[in-house]
Amino acid sequence: QVQLVESGGGSVQSGGSLRLSCAASGRTYSSYCMGWFRQGPGKEREGVAVLDNFSRTLYADSVKGRFTISQDNAKNTLYLQMNSLKPEDTAMYYCADNPLQPCSGSWGQAWKYDYWGQGTQVTVSS
């Protein structure tokens, strides 16, 4: 059974940085698209950044140049380094995993992902 556990959220001031981690277990597939989504108050869940088994990375326009997604395969951990945080980045951040296929142009559609973590809250104050 695949399990994803996020950590690293918190409260920071505008311009600050945070690094989120997603510890994964039970993943036995070699092809995948895995990444981060977020859901702010009263908003729909949106894709933030993903990477796949080809090490290809994709980002939402709103975070390009500020966020970096990476993985440590030895630790089975996915990361999201978030710099230059803005109040509009405030949201619950979720780790998500779409097994058996690499990322595609429709990577931002939450329904494509089979496995989800419980989320970690990020709050950015102005």
Image (tube, grey):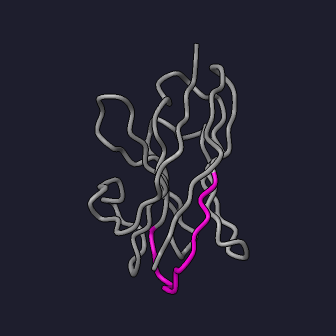
Q: Position of residue 70 (x, y in %)?
A: 64, 59
Count up the numbered dots.
0
- 16 relative to 80, above or below: above
Query: Which residue: 49% across, 56% down?
Result: 95
Query: Is 106 on the left-hand or right-hand side of 119?
Result: left
User: Image quadrant of residue 82?
Assistant: top right
Q: Quadrant of the C terminus?
A: top right
Query: Is 28 on the left-hand or right-hand side of 72?
Result: left
Residue furthest to the top in view is 126
Q: Nearer the viewer, residue 24 or 65?
A: 24
- 70 relative to 61, above or below: below
Query: Which residue: 41% across, 67% down?
Result: 103
Q: Quadrant of the N terminus?
A: bottom left
Magenta residues? 21-33
Q: Nearer the viewer, residue 74 or 84?
A: 74
Q: Nearer the viewer, residue 20 or 6?
A: 6
Q: Position of residue 91 (x, y in %)?
A: 46, 34
The stretch drawn in magenta includes residue 24: yes
Residue furthest to the right in view is 74
Q: Position of residue 79 (x, y in %)?
A: 63, 55
- 115 relative to 84, above or below: below
Query: Which residue: 39% across, 78% down?
Result: 101
- 56 relative to 69, above or below: below
